[in-house]
Image: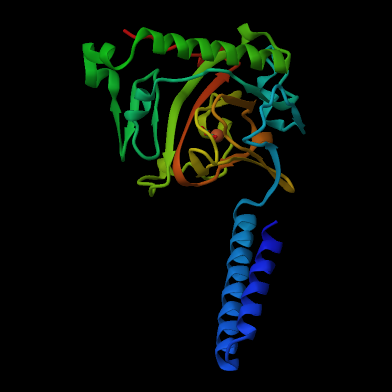
Amino acid sequence: GACSEGRIYLCSVLSVRKSRAHQESRRKWLKVAFLVSSAVLVSLLSWSYLVSEDGVAEVLAHYSESLQDRFIEVPCSEDYDSHKRFEVLLCHSRLLFHAYQFVFFPPFYFCLLSQASILDLHSGALSVGKHFVNLYRYFGDKIQEVFTEEDFQLYRDVRRRIQQTIAQAFGISSSSMYLTKPTFFSRINSTEAKTTHDEYWHPHIDKVTYGSFDYTSLLYLSDYTEDFGGGRFVFMDVGANRTVEPRAGRVSFFTSGSENLHRVEKVRWGTRYAITISFTCNPDHGIEDPVLT
Ligand SMILES: O=C(O)CCC(=O)C(=O)O
Ligand SMILES: [Fe+2]
């Protein structure tokens, strides 16, 4: 391991030094001691920084694992009392990972995105720095040159598969779930946030932040450690933080109430792509799939 390598290196430095003048040897020894202790100090500091910032206690989904259908049950919250009128029983707040094979969204979507930005295919809203641009209005008839019908087909197909998977996992009927907004692509890199909307790293409850969410699903489109550093998803459970390491094609989903308080770590390098697709049980909050008009 790294420790024993460090020791061997130190030994050979010391044995060479023995044959040299005493003073020089002393100076070099001090230098080595200084270097070694700085290295120890730096690693201690970065370790405590990581632990104190992220408090990571448990990795639910390691980036290198190809997980299928892992459930974690968390205690119920009381957020759902007002939902009793819907068919669904939301009391079992679980989450599940599902690996989709071969889900590739056209990179072009992301060329449009800059820094920490989102693209909502439903409304056409694209965040550009501090502002939003409506892509559909901006491109008008030329939108067909930006997106193809196949792009939208893929999006709808992925949405449908995720909806079915959630319904099955939670034992509800897929027809009692409705797509809701916002549902968006996100691109995050390590540049500074320009507005508070860019501050994706704060702990939050999706139902509070977005209102209509009952189920949140996240489809990751890039790999933790390969494409970006930081940017892990963290469930902030009482007494433990539980992380999900993004992996392209990995879907995680969970009920959107206070039982699933979460945050995303700051992205330290590279670029992170994901899609948030959300569902509601209230038909009044449902939206249609986006269509290319
Ligand atoms: O991208 C993620 O991993 C999570 C994003 C998120 O928390 C959200 O969209 O509410
Ligand atoms: Fe969220």
**Can you tell which quarter of the image residue 35 is in?**
bottom right
Q: Position of residue 7 (x, y in %)?
A: 69, 68
Camera-side residue: 246 or 6?
Answer: 6
Q: Residue furthest front?
A: 19
Q: From the viewer's perspective, is 74 left or right of 150?
A: right
Name the quarter where the N terminus is drawn. bottom right
* Residue at 65% over, 22% down: 98
Q: Position of residue 285 (x, y in %)?
A: 51, 17
Camera-side residue: 265 or 75?
Answer: 265
Q: How is the image coloured?
A: rainbow
* Residue at 51% over, 30% down: 210
**Can residue 177 be seen in this snapshot?**
no
**Can you tell which quarter of the image residue 174 is in?**
top right
Instruction: Identify whether 194 is placed above or below 287.
Output: below
Q: Position of residue 249 (x, y in %)?
A: 56, 24
Q: How many marks?
A: 0
* Residue at 23% over, 18% down: 139
**Can residue 148 be seen in this snapshot?**
yes
Q: From the viewer's perspective, is 229 left or right of 132?
A: right
* Residue at 65% over, 15% down: 165
